[in-house]
Amino acid sequence: MLAENTKIGKTVEKRIKNRIIYSVCLVVLGAASVILGMGGFLPVELSDYLSGFYSGVGTGLIAAGILTIIRNIRTLKNEKLLKEKEIYENDERNKMIGLKTWSYTGYAMFIILYVGLLVAGFIGEMVLNTILVILGVYALCLFFAGLYCKKTM
């Protein structure tokens, strides 16, 4: 395999194996969502909308997780695909595009949450509090990600 030949190959293989683990987590979360949607383990009955929502989201997560697992296992077993993945992931342009995408998305999310916070007060207190909690968690994620990046980079 590529990993036997290069240190970079080992890094790419490790990333792919981590993605497989994350995908397994998605499948488990999807299964939990489907079970929730079917009314399993709940003392209350869900509305048809919530039942369909949880079942649909869960089915989507399961399908996406399984497809990602298959794709990543296929990449690990194929020397040519692994080499292509190594080149793609180590390309500076692709790295910069990824960083810029996350950065712009982060800014947009903050603005959208804040606008939602301004509007939510007119809709209801519970909506306002929900968006406020999401904004707070988002801010904490930004803070801890910044600390982590400063320490590791």
Image (tube, rainbow, N blue to C red):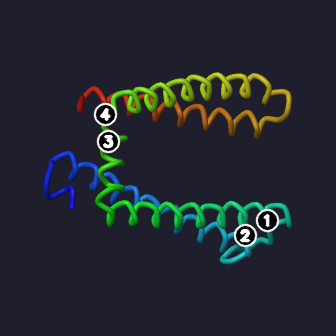
Q: CA distance from mark 4 to mark 2?
A: 36 Å
Secondary structure beneath label 4: helix
Task: Please report the residue visible at 85 percent of the width from the left and 65 percent of the height from the top.
Answer: 47
Q: Which residue is disc 3 drawn over?
A: 87
Q: Who is closer to the viewer here, 8 or 142?
A: 8
Task: Tell me, yes or no, if residue 64 can be seen here.
Answer: yes
Quadrant in which the C terminus is drawn: top left
Looking at the image, how many numbered discs can be counted on the residues? Answer: 4
Residue 93 quadrant: top left
Q: CA distance from mark 3 to mark 1?
A: 42 Å
Amino acid type at circle 3 is Ile
Q: Which residue is disc 2 drawn over?
A: 37
First in sequence, mark 3 or 4: give its number.
3
Amino acid type at circle 1 is Gly
Task: Please report the residue visible at 73 percent of the width from the left and 28 percent of the height from the top.
Answer: 116
Nearest to viewer (mark 3 / mark 1): 3
Query: 10 Å neighbourhood of mark 4: few (<14), some, or many (≥20)?
Result: few
Percent position (x, y) of residue 70? 46, 67
Q: Which residue is disc 4 drawn over?
A: 148
Percent position (x, y) of residue 28? 52, 68
Amino acid type at circle 2 is Gly
Q: CA distance from mark 4 to mark 1?
A: 39 Å
Q: Are marks 1 and 2 in contact (CB under 8 Å)?
A: yes
Q: CA distance from mark 2 to mark 3?
A: 42 Å
Residue 90 quadrant: top left
